[in-house]
Image (cartoon, grey):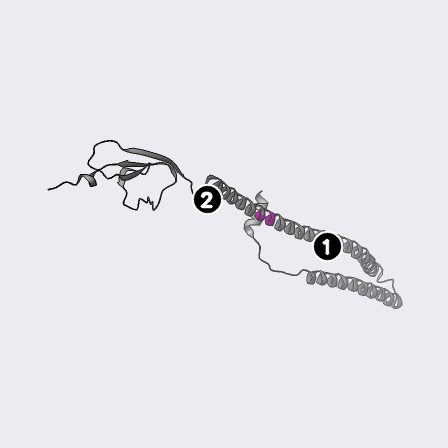
Amino acid sequence: EVIDHAKSNKVKLRYRLIGMQDDWIELDNTRHINFNHIPTGDYILEVEAFRPHIDCEGKRISMKIQVLPPWWSTWWFRLLMTLLFFSAILLIFRRRMRKLEEEQIVLQKKVDERTTELKQALQDKDRLISVIAHDLKNPMFAIVGALETWIGKEKQMNDADKRSLIGDTYQSSLTLQREMLKLLDWAKSKRDEILCHPSDIDLRFVTNNVVL
């Protein structure tokens, strides 16, 4: 076999990317270096010129290469996402607390209104009882006095006195009846004012406010 020494002395190129691939790769005639994907990091690209069939170190050049991460993998983007995440949680928490405070204010307002109405109703009741007691006292005493007179002086009374005493007792009874009707009408009006308004209530919210 004949060896062509002219071809064997032809200079060729090979390269390697230290940090990702330490083995030498021989370049073709186009002498283009292509990488499909290089991870983030620091590398050294070495290119060496050599002669086949000659066992000697060729001329070598190197170049440092730094592959930066994409913007979504940078530390500042991750820090920004972390801050936005916690800010969103804080915002949701503050809105929830504001809503609970508003519901508590509305609930407290309703309680205050009902308390005021109850106090007013109790004052009206006490005032009415005082007025009715005063109005019932006179006809009641008149009836009792007339009956005592009838029992004690029935034999000494003539027919005219008896009729007069019965008339006075009757008038006092009518007065007593009117006052009793007034009391019943007032009780009925207050009963009609007590209205039922069913509504949904957050028992957990109410319980937490009572416990806390």
- Give the residue type that dot 1 points to: Ala
Q: Is residue 58 left or right of residue 186?
A: left
Residue that mark 1 sits on: 121
Q: Residues within 10 Å of mark 1 (few under 14, many from 20)?
A: few
In the displayed image of the protein, which residue is found farthest to the top?
56
In this rendered view, identify the residue nearer to me: 146 or 211.
211
- State yes or no: discs 1 and 2 in contact (Cβ < 8 Å): no
Q: Is residue 183 left or right of residue 65?
A: right
| Residue 142 quadrant | bottom right
Residue 118 in the image, given as x and y percentages of width and height = 70, 53
Picture residue at 70% right of the left edge, 61% below the top: 193
Q: Is residue 13 above or below residue 92?
A: above
| Residue 146 quadrant | bottom right
Residue 34 in the image, given as x and y percentages of width and height = 33, 45
> Which label is found at residue 18?
none
How far apart marks 1 and 2 lie (CA) works out to 71 Å
Residue 52 in the image, given as x and y percentages of width and height = 21, 37
Picture residue at 61% right of the left edge, 51% below the top: 103
In the displayed image of the protein, which residue is found farthest to the front?
6
Q: Judge depth for marks 1 and 2 and give the one in front.
A: 2
Residue that mark 2 sits on: 71
Q: Secondary structure at mark 1?
A: helix
Picture residue at 77% right of the left edge, 56% below the top: 128
Residues in magenta, as a range: 95-100
Residue 99 colored magenta?
yes
- Give the residue type that dot 2 points to: Trp
Q: Secondary structure at mark 2?
A: helix
